[in-house]
Amino acid sequence: MKEDLKALRARIDGIDDAILKLVSERAGIAQQVGRAKNGEKIYRPEREAQIVRRLRESNPGPLSGEVVERLIREIISSCRALEQITRIAYLGPAGTFSQQAVHKHFGHEAEAIAEIDIDTCFHTVETGRADFAVVPVENSTEGSVGRTLDLIVSSSLKICSEVMLPIRQTLMRKQGGLDGIFRVYGHAQSLAQCQQWLNRHLPNAERVSVVSNSEGARLAAEERNAATLGSEAAAELYGLVVVEARVEDEVSNTTRFLVLGQADAAPSGCDKTSLVMGAKNQPGSVVKLLQPFADAGISMSKFESRPARSSNWEYLFFVVCNAHRQDAKMVAALAEVEARAAFLKVLGSYPAASA
């Protein structure tokens, strides 16, 4: 038995050596690619999406597709950093789910820049102090993030990628156990996403909304009888004990984040296009706006109306189409929509994220 174990470990050592050699070779080739680009942008979302998609589809197991994606994105992140450090603005502070989204998509070699609000994330990229911004746009249980939608209408930034982040809410405090918890901090959306669990297990605890779960963690670290909701990363950052994991009411709870930059992405083979449009004030105008997509056989994964900030009782319609803006059928549909719309803005085309 010991000899069998020794032989297996020897095989693992050999494989590890081969992995290191291949990763180093990949990094060297990535440097050559960077030099061949001759000043072109380092981050190519369509190319990275193609790599991730191909490896997930060809994955033989036993590792999950999610694990394979995490590994390859960290390798890509490290290779990219050899050429240039990518700066990413996100809704801070550290320890938030937004920071997790940055790390999931760009890896840990990117420089994550915590900002105080979504407005500042936009401004940081618009002024060139960051290369990209990662901002939340909708949650599967709590709906859209209105501020992101409002800002993207007027901003020059384009959507160049998206990130789907499963939200795993954790209850944490200075010591273990539920006894003695009189107050629970959390971002308003986190409190809403965990209200059934809180009703069952902490019905008498005061629920206090804070600007971020990281702020809740900071406060809980100072109060013996308080707990907070948030990520396990926040617990580690603020020295808290995880009292209960997975306290979200919906196990499929997911937040969709947008990656915003100065330009959108080239076609990757599996893409989305986001746009916003306004209808003319006449009967059937909204139906007429959507008809070109139906005629072209383009499916929509999202259609949402939102009040236009420029005028009372007028609405903008946010649409996500399952096609790239350069696809022939999409080009024709957009031309027809533009002729019918009072307002049309293509917000960007980008690779569809893995579920």
Image: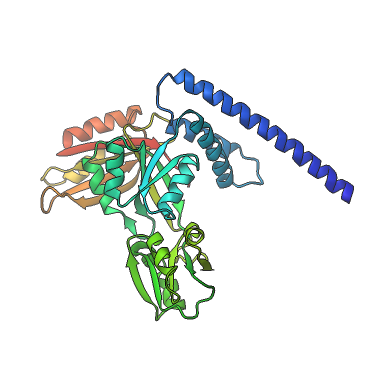
Q: Position of residue 47 (x, y in %)?
A: 47, 30
Instruction: Please report the residue visible at 51 percent of the width from the left and 36 percent of the height from the top.
Output: 77
Q: Please name the residue shown 40% across and 21% down the image.
A: 39
Q: Would you identify the image quadrant in which residue 153 lies? A: top left
User: Residue 249: x and y, percent?
Assistant: 44, 66
Q: Which is nearer the eye, 271 or 225?
A: 225
Task: Name above or below for residue 282 compared with residue 204.
Answer: above
Name the spot of residue 8 as percent of width and height, x first: 81, 44
Q: Quadrant of residue 71?
A: top right
- In the displayed structure image, the side of residue 26 where residue 196 appears, left or right: left
Instruction: Establish if 206 lies above or below 17.
Output: below
Where residue 346 sits, quadrant-wise, is top left
User: Furthest residue to the front?
Assistant: 222
Badge count: 0
Q: Is residue 92 visible?
A: yes
Q: Position of residue 232 (x, y in %)?
A: 50, 59
108 or 325: nearer the viewer: 108
Q: Is residue 3 above or below residue 332?
A: below
Q: How is the image coloured?
A: rainbow
State whether residue 245 is above or below residue 341. Answer: below
